[in-house]
Image (cartoon, grey):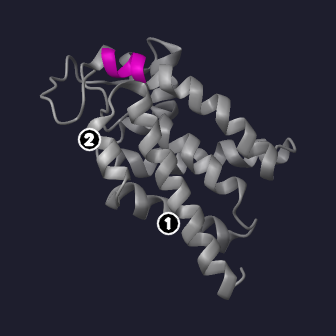
């Protein structure tokens, strides 16, 4: 199993041709958002919002959205693993399916207000970037598609816990 502590070599520089060459690459790169040169994880997190609003309009909300995140997570293990192998780097920064699924999970339990959506984004990005223990520990030791997905799942859990604590005193 390749971990982020081992040396990995990018086999190719991903571009639109690569992203469109396989459905797994298209999803892993967040419909293209992961191709952003600066802060692809942030762009990937933002890519969750249109998907969230479409699902919300279709009635997939709250607990139903959280339950939907389970098969999206499981699929993400393969999607991210497959794309990572094609690139030669298991957790390449442009692979953002993990951010999308984790952000959908956070949004499932977020107050349906612009301020709630902004808070959800800020908290998730904070924990995804800072990677407090055990997120960083897992990120460094667990490889493959599961490793890509699991640290963002924990960042989502941290964001949800922080949101719950904040909203106990300041309801949105």
User: Residue at coordinates 46% horizontally, 46% vertically from top-left?
Assistant: 152
Dot 2 alpha-carbon crowd within 10 angstroms: few under 14, some 14 to 19, many 20 or more: some
Viewer-closest of 114 and 62: 62
Q: Quadrant of the C terminus?
A: bottom right
All told, the count of numbered labels is 2
Image x and y of residue 148, in percent: 40, 34
Give the side of residue 104 with respect to residue 99, left or right.
right
Image x and y of residue 83, in percent: 39, 20
Our reading of the magenta stretch's main secondary structure is helix
- Regarding mark 2 in the picture, which secondary structure is present there? helix
User: Residue at coordinates 51% horizontally, 46% vertically from top-left?
Assistant: 153
Give the side of residue 124 with respect to residue 4, left or right.
right
- Regarding mark 1 in the picture, which secondary structure is present there? helix
Residue 61 visible from this viewpoint: no
Viewer-closest of 135 and 10: 135
**Residue 33 counted in the magenta span:** no
Viewer-closest of 126 and 29: 126
Q: Residue furthest bottom?
A: 169
Residue 25 visible from this viewpoint: yes
**Mark 1 highlights which residue?**
123
Q: Which span is picked out in magenta?
A: 81-85
Q: Residue furthest left?
A: 7
Please tell me whether residue 127 is drawn above or below residue 32 in the rendered image: below
**Mark 2 highlights which residue?**
140
């Amino acid at each position: 199993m390749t971990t982020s502590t081992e040396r990995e070599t990018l086999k190719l520089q991903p571009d639109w041709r690569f992203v469109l060459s396989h459905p797994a690459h298209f999803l892993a790169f967040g419909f293209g958002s992961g191709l952003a040169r600066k802060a692809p994880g942030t762009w990937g997190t933002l890519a969750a919002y249109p998907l969230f609003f479409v699902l919300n309009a279709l009635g997939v909300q709250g607990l139903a959205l959280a339950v939907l995140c389970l098969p999206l997570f499981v699929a993400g293990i393969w999607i991210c693993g497959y794309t990572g192998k094609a690139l030669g780097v298991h957790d390449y920064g442009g692979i953002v399916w993990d951010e999308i699924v984790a952000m959908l999970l956070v949004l499932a339990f977020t107050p349906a207000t612009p301020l709630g959506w902004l808070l959800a984004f800020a908290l998730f990005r904070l924990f995804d970037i800072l990677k407090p223990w055990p997120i960083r520990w897992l990120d460094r030791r667990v490889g493959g598609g599961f490793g890509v997905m699991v640290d963002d799942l924990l960042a989502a859990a941290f964001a949800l816990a922080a949101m719950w604590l904040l909203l106990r005193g300041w309801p949105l």
